[in-house]
Image (spheres, grey):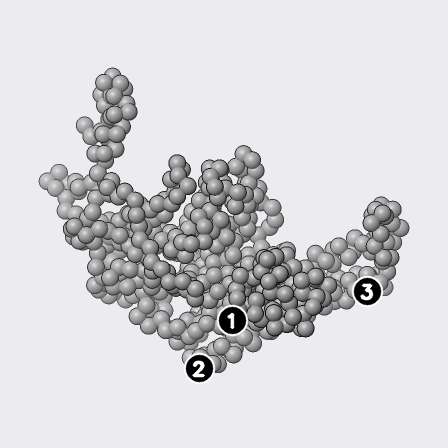
Amino acid sequence: MQRFSSNMAAQRRNFMQSPHQSWTDDLPLCQMCGVGTAPNCVYGSDGKSTQSHPNEDGHLRFRGEDGCFLYGVFNGYDGSRVASFASQCLTAELLLGQLNSSHTDNDVRRILTQAFDVVEKSYFETIDDALAEKAHLSNYLLPHNENVSFHQLSPQSQKVQERLKELEQEVSGGATAVVALILNNKLYIANVGTNRVLLCKSSSDGQNQVLQIGRPHSTDNEDELQRLAALGVDSARARQAGQIAGQSSTRRLGDYRAKFNYNEIDLLSVAKTRPIIAEPEIHGSLSLDGVTGFLLLMSEGLINALESAHGPEQANQEIVAMVAAELAQQTSLEAVSQSVVERVKRLHHDVYVSGRQRATYCSRHEDMTLLIRTLNYPLADAALTPTQGGRIYPVSVPYSNSQSTSKTSVTLSLVMPSQSTLTNGTNTASTLEEGTPTPGQSPTATLQSTNTQTQSSSSSSGDGSLFRQRGSQAAQPDETGRVPPYVDFTQFYRLWGGDHSDSQSTQGGLGPQ
């Protein structure tokens, strides 16, 4: 029995550890997107962070044939096995000839649903042997006795216990997933779990409309609670618990315990059939014709970190403002994505060390992943300055005042290059007729947020007197070759002079000489 179990385990480990890269080796990466990541961490009393487990998130970003693009973000837990398997298997199920431009919306939705079903079944096939071995070895154990320690067990029982622990680690874990598919310039979203998708559309009047596509499958989702109640689960109890089998998601990939042993879970034991499912909720199609903006796919860890620091009310607007600000400054989408993740990570840490009201929510955060896909949206050109044709785009940048528990914003005019249209990765010049700040006009960007629950708008606030309003015309150099300063430091010099009058008299003062 032991020899047979060892052979099975060796074959299974070889399969699970193989990279499966042959599935997607020939697929090119999409160059119109970038991914930023950050590992989980726990803060100590001194504010220093420690990673508590290896990164469990995953992602995909491929360009297929026939104008097809596939993106995904996977939030793994109890290991990265399911997230890694799903990212590879989904790609193989969607981009190896299954989709083409002749497919209708119904065809695409059916293919997406089938792909998730195949991924779920295929993953459980990879752990079938482990589950069988686990069940077989469990028969050799005596009923659990709390008064008997591990060291008091017989050598054979100890080996069985150790092997069962190894098997449990091998088969446990799961992942939530959100996938974005672009086909025929139409967007489809398939969601399982608690990740988030935002679509930001920039309009000709300078406003950014933020659309949250779908809602998280959690115990706060009324539709999910009704689905569970129809199966006999106490929905009020589920809402109060906030988690099911250790996770907030009501839909997930993998997690054999919640799928096959749910009758052993107190909250789910009365369910008529499997309550935790991997069926995706499909949204779309949504036409992207004429759309200028960007698409964001975010893991639950990124969302929770931002909401823990600043609350959930304006999280969508804040992340979009950060992305817009970085797009105006960075020259690569990889740098944009990573910079935004680092900003969220730093914001979360700063709130914790500040000791303010929300610090208690920020003692730790999970892995964070952000995927940005631009839609005819230009990146900054490092070679262009405001005097060389760079355009000025106003962005409301969230700013946290360390002396206050409230959030304010500072309005900045951010330089971006003249817009060009991106078509399947190629640049074609186009003329941008959007309004930019004119003399006397407040350079404020408005973000309109829309989702299935609320519709609101927000704009920047706070004192922007230090930042001069600039017109749409590029600044011209004077006779000395200099351009007017972008920031008026008069108020700064005055305040500094009032606080350092003594040092000014002895050192010659501060300010332009």
The picture places residue 267, in percent across and down from the top left corner, at 67, 62
* Residue that numbered label 3 is attached to: 136
Using the rendered view, name the quadrant where residue 45 is placed.
top right
Query: For the residue labelled by badge 2, is the local secondary structure a helix, a strand or a loop?
Result: loop
Mark closest to the chain's N terminus, 2 or 3: 2
Residue flagged by tag 1: what amino acid is it?
Answer: Glu
Please name whichever residue, 182 or 213, is drawn nearer the observer in this view of the structure: 213
Q: Nearer the viewer, mark 1 or mark 3?
A: 1
Disc 2 or 1, which lies upstream in sequence?
2
The residue lying furthest to the top in this view is 506
Residue 12 drawn at (x, y percent): 71, 64
**Quick check: 386 left or right of 80?**
left
Is residue 287 visible in the rendered image? The answer is yes
Q: Position of residue 79 (x, y in %)?
A: 63, 56
Q: Secondary structure at mark 3?
A: helix
Secondary structure at badge 1 equals strand
Residue neighbourhood size for the residue with mark 2, other residues' Cα within 10 Å, grouped as few (<14), some (14–19), many (≥20): few
Residue where numbered disc 1 is placed: 281
In the picture as drawn, the residue positioned furthest to the right comes out as 154
Q: Nearer the viewer, mark 2 or mark 1?
A: 1
Looking at the rendered structure, the kind of residue marked 3 is His
User: Mark 3 Cα within 10 Å, few/some/many (few <14, many 20+)?
Assistant: some
Q: Is residue 59 left or right of residue 296?
A: right
Quarter of the image where one finds residue 156: bottom right
Q: Which residue is identified by label 2?
A: 104
Classify mark 1: residues with Cα within 10 Å, few (<14), some (14-19) or many (20+): some
Q: How far apart are labels 1 and 3 at the CA level?
A: 37 Å
Q: Residue at x 52, y 64 (%)?
A: 221
How far apart are the two marked residues, 2 and 3, measured between alpha carbons? 48 Å
